[in-house]
Image (cartoon, rainbow, N blue to C red):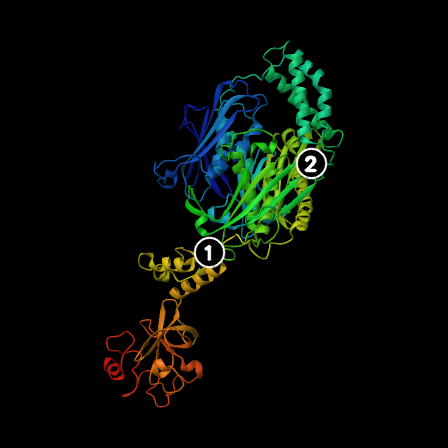
Amino acid sequence: MVSEAKRVDVEIGGKQISLETGALAKQANGAVLVTSGETVVLVTATAAPEPKAGAGFLPLTVDYRARTYAAGRIPGGFFKREGKARDGEILTSRLIDRSIRPLFPEGFTHEIQITAIVLSTDQENDPDILGMIGASAALWVSNIPFNGPIGVARIGRKDGQLVVNPSGPDAEEGGLDIVVAGSKDALLMVEGGATEEPESGILEAFELAQKEIQQLCAAQEKLAQGLRKETMPWTPPEIPEDLKKGVDQVARAAVKDAVRIAEKSARDKKVAEIKKVLKEKLLPAFPGSEAQIQHELDEILYVEARALILDEKRRSDGRGYQDIRPLSSRVGVLPRTHGSALFTRGQTQALATTTLGTPSDMQIMDELEGEYKERFLFHYNFPGFSTGEPKMDRGPGRREIGHGALAKRALYPMLPSEDEFPYTIRIVSDILESNGSSSMASVCGGLLSLYDAGVPVKKPVAGIAMGLVKEGPKVAILTDIMGLEDHLGDMDFKVAGTPDGVNGIQMDIKIAGISINLLKEALEHARVARLKILDHMKQTLADPRAELSPHAPRMIRVMIPVDKIGALIGPGGKNIRRIIEETGAEVEVEDDGSVYISSIDALSVERAQAQVEGLTAEAEVGKIYKGKVTRIMGIGVFVEIMPGKEGLVRMSQLSDHFVEKAEDEVKEGQEIEVKVLEVDMQGRINLSRKAVLKPGSENEPTPGGGGGFRGGGRGGPGGFRGGAGGRFGGSGDRSRGRR
């Protein structure tokens, strides 16, 4: 590194971003400290001095890590230190990798590691964007060969207007969040989500990002002036010309035939046979050249597959540029799941299931900003058998986490609100067969499984992957790319959304950039294809099912006053345990007063709801309740009008005629209708049965009886407020004396 510190400032989206090098991590090939507000990220770039033996691709590793001290927090857990990367860190690492990977020279096989460490965060300026900028800057001031620099901008929407690098709340509430990376002249990577953003709005976001990217590139060039070291010496791997000619003579014609085979496994088998023949014929003359033979075979495959598309205007499976592979979909394929769907596009097949749970099933996310609960989960699995390979299942890798996040982003805006549908929702997409665009198959299958589960989704969602093959002026934009076109093409552009707009978008390229005009054309083709897929899905299941699966829990959400939470739970949890035991339902109470009641049995939910409301609701004056007589006393009868809430029906209010003994009128356990006359300052409830039997009579003297509403006469029954040591009052004389 350099011996002197140098700093360059640039204003992006109305906020200053500072790039500083030369003060920290000076033994790395390149290191840059990126600051915006009080968010600080250190990014380093290191490279091995020698190429990695046997590497057939660029051995690039990116690690983005956010230290919890950056937010003034101590990590949770037993060890109280950071462990494996969180999902958010993995997704940001992928963003950095995808942005810079196309810009390393072909044939460079030295191991490269980019490390980005979040040192401080103010919750206003996104550290992920600073980390991406820092990765480019660290490479640009280093001696690592890199055809940069690049800039990065997050585009959001505030008050209907596009904004650059919005602050935290604005980024979440504007309905648009797209990260764009690019060089001065072209775009390199796109990742983002929206809520039915029209294609025109996406293009406007690209154009705005491009302007800010140019400023960031200029700032990095200024930073590197006078500091950038001479590029480290390296030589691309040399292959003997005789070996090249030998591979070409043996393989060229056979490869031309192979790339015209429509079925993936048959094509792969043909290529494997070609490889076997090459080794048999060439290894005796060129011992130890397996890697070189494979490299040359890959080159021929690359050239012939692209020539088929650009020169013959056809694809390996015979489709035209904008044709979609055959579609097939079914729902309800698994008997005990809450919702299931099988979606097939060509040789790509996704089995998607939806499971509904209670709030206790929410995932607790421990991110740099702190802990929060995630109600919607989308898990993508890619087993080896989906491509016909034996592969150990070691859990989800970075690719699986990234694909799941994209599918989740596409579906999330169309989910019902928690108030409308309080369930925790988990979708799992198991890829059973893969030949390109399995993440978009997961979106389509996931939507159908939600429909099958009866989740009231606002609008249907589908996705499609677009591709690009470009050689000079020759350009082919491909709809619904398969694996070969993804591997040998120049772009993988995934677009998912509803009939009315885009919800999720992701673009990766393998060339040094793509113009906005080409992306405009690709977006329009994607829109047309998306509508065709949505039409197909509509024929399978047009709307969400009206009823949930019989195997799904029935759940309701009841809001209670926060000051009633204690009354619901009871001392030591006595009340809530009683409700659970008596009804068989699960009851979960949140700090905001939300009470979630769930059970497989709908009747259990109703019974538990009644008890919850009874313990927390207030008796309404003037309302008629049906209650059970719990006690009979000389002054009247006690009636439970709600679980745990009793009121007193005085003798004078027990009937529309004179009652000498309460037992002559009602019995314990009998259900009667009563009207609430009063709730006093102490919460005691005064009831009247007479007002139900003869409306409006509650203030009339009972024939042959005592006084009216407020208390008995000298010889009549006592009033509500007095009593000989009892809560609700005793005889008339004592009642009068108490007052």
Numbered badge on residue 598: 1
In contact (CB < 8 Å): disc 2 and disc 1: no
Find residue 682 and report its image quarter.
Answer: bottom left
Residue toward you, 639 or 85: 639
Numbered badge on residue 477: 2
Q: At which x and y percent is residue 451?
A: 59, 51
User: Is residue 729 shown to the viewer in this render?
Assistant: yes
577 is higher (above) or lower (below) than 658: above
In the rendered view, does 492 fall on the left or right side of 87? right
Q: Which residue sits furthest bottom?
A: 704
Q: Secondary structure at mark 2?
A: strand
User: Is residue 224 shown to the viewer in this render?
Assistant: no
Q: Secondary structure at mark 1?
A: strand
Residue toward you, 305 or 162: 305
Residue toward you, 569 or 47: 569
Amino acid found under the numbered disc labelled 1: Ser
444 is higher (above) or lower (below) than 399: below
Between disc 2 and disc 1, the foreground one is: 1
Numbered badge on residue 291: none
Which of the two labelled residues, at mark 2 and mark 1, occupies the earlier sequence position?
Answer: 2
Distance from label 2 to label 1 (Cα)?
50 Å
Q: At which x and y percent is residue 269?
A: 67, 25
Q: At which x and y percent is residue 96?
A: 51, 33
Q: Decide: few, some or many residues near mark 2? Use Cα within 10 Å; few <14, some 14-19, many ≥20.
A: many
Amino acid found under the numbered disc labelled 2: Ile
Residue drawn at point x = 37 percent, y = 59 percent: 578
387 is higher (above) or lower (below) than 363: above
Find residue 738 and report its image quarter.
Answer: bottom left
Quarter of the image where the C terminus is located: bottom left
Q: At which x and y percent is residue 533?
A: 67, 45
